[in-house]
Amino acid sequence: MELALPAWFEIGSFVVLGLVLAFDLLYVYKRPHIPSPRESALWVSFYVALALVFALLMLTIGDAEHAGQFLAGWLTEYSLSIDNLFVFVIIMARFKVPRKYQQEVLMVGIILALVFRGVFIVLGAGLIASFSAIFYLFGAFLLWTAFNQAFGNHDDEGGEDSWFIRFARRHLKVSSQYEGNKLRTTVAGRRMFTPLIIVFLALGTTDLLFALDSIPAIFGITQSPFIVFTANVFALMGLRQLYFLLGHLLDKLVYLKYGIAFILAFIGVKLVFHAMHENELPFINGGEHIEWAPDISTWTSLAVIVGAMLVATIASLVKLRMSGTTVAAAIDGDEPEQDDTDAAAVDGIQEDPRT
């Protein structure tokens, strides 16, 4: 279904979202700190409420189909963004980023994610417009991704640097110590990068890989570039605060990966059915549409996405409770050694005679 919203609404939405992101970036830059659970929860609630208000506006200005596609796309991207947090936690721990500066690092990661997803949205929209059979490829890719998500071995994820990070380490002069939020420093009269450059490169390559998963997934729900982009923006807003709210709980949500895998598999099947329904490939059914292929509705997709995430989250929390660990303790964190390391790193930066 071709959907069209008033131009003033789309332009106004981009302006407002740009201002919100700019304020968030300025806030982090001017006030680097470790957010409390209460502060993080308030910000996450604000961004979720903002997304729901936006869906209500789409319902009022557009129709139920607009609102349903946005909600389904936003929830899909939000679940994939939570999965992205697992890797962010690993990167922060692996490179020993002081917690005081993790907000700024995460904000850079979110901006990079927006840039990469914006590029893939433009490319994806162009492919869909000129080559409808791309849905076969999108569907197959998501089914493979779902299988790897559910049954792949993720134990060593983050254990080894990628070839790109190893290349950067060899060819960039990087100091051994963080110096606040600086990217460049002077050591013994030589200009060098601080370890932040490696962290940013690691986040960037991670964002690129996640964009490859997320864009085909949301194009399985809507083909409107405006809805695709706004759903991605709303999914990424508040991700920084969610990191501090759930950082220690993420690795305890053991069934979350299966919920995400189920969502990706469902959307993959939906894309294949859509491709069959719109089929124009001459070697499949003689180039004719396959009429028996079901066209799964937006509201069915929304119900499946919400149901999968609820089941995965509740099952994980039940297992967490049965193991004797309370959710509150998991959120507060049970890794004092990491906090001591971060505190020592911050102290080291402050006491370094070069700063």
Image (spheres, rainbow, N blue to C red):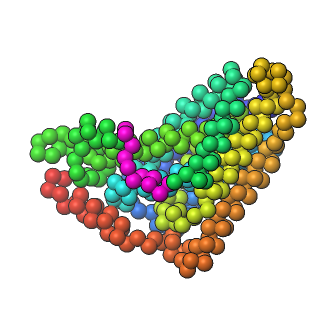
Residue that appears at 68% across and 28% down? 134
Q: Hey, which quadrant is residue 224 in on the image?
A: top right
Q: Position of residue 312 (x, y in %)?
A: 66, 62
Indicate left or right for 346 with 199 as reference: left
- By secondary structure, the bulk of the magenta-drawn segment is best described as loop
Q: Hey, which quadrant is residue 231 in on the image?
A: top right
Q: Nearer the viewer, residue 50 or 272?
A: 272
**Is residue 248 in view?**
yes
Q: Position of residue 255 (x, y in %)?
A: 61, 62
The magenta stretch spans residue 283: no
Indicate left or right for 115 with 255 as reference: left
Q: Nearer the viewer, residue 250 or 352?
A: 250
Q: Position of residue 345 (x, y in %)?
A: 27, 61
Residue that appears at 68% across and 37% down? 139
The magenta stretch spans residue 158: yes
Indicate left or right for 290 with 239 as reference: right
Q: How many marks?
A: 0
Indicate left or right for 54 with 294 as reference: left
Residue that appears at 47% across and 40% down? 112
Residue that appears at 51% across and 54% down? 153
Q: Which residues are magenta?
A: 154-164
Q: Position of residue 276 (x, y in %)?
A: 79, 31
